Amino acid sequence: KERGEERGEERGEERGEERGEAFHCFHSYSYRAKGERKGERKGERKGERKGERKGERKGERKGERKGERKGERKGERKGERKGERKGE
């Protein structure tokens, strides 16, 4: 009887520890990609807003500046050529 009780206590403690570790791992790593911090999504850096990728503002693609569309050259605004103002 004494042996059984001792074993039961040991098992209970071990199980408790295992559960705690498993929960901790699940909580911290399951939904977060490797190398990301809390509050970030995949490919986001701290301080970037939701839906932005590295070095981009929302609605922009990589290699574009604010207000530029893909295929427009650097320094051009929407629907303009470099050195022209809108409506010219």
Image (cartoon, rainbow, N blue to C red):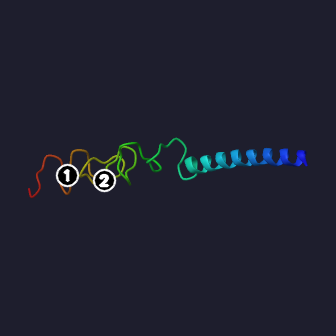
Which amino acid, mark 2? Gly
Q: Residue at x 35, y 50 (%)?
A: 49
Query: Is residue 3 toward the left or the right of residue 88 in the image?
Result: right
| Residue 47, quarter of picture | top left
Q: Residue furthest left?
A: 88
Alpha carbons under labels 1 and 2: distance apart: 11 Å
Mark 2 crowd level (few <14, some 14–19, many ≥20, 10 Å Cα): few
In the picture of the structure, the residue carrying the numbered disc 2 is: 71
Residue 77: mark: 1
Q: Please tell me whether mark 1 or mark 2 is closer to you in this view.
A: 1
Q: Looking at the image, do the residues carrying marks 1 and 2 touch, with CB atoms under 8 Å apart?
A: no
Image position, residue 76 (x, y; %): 20, 49
69 vs 71, nearest the viewer: 69
Q: Residue at x 55, y 47 (%)?
A: 28
Which amino acid, mark 1? Arg
Mark 1 crowd level (few <14, some 14–19, many ≥20, 10 Å Cα): some
Q: Residue at x 70, y 48 (%)?
A: 16
Residue 45: mark: none
The earlier-in-sequence mark between 1 and 2 is: 2
For the image, the number of numbered tags is 2
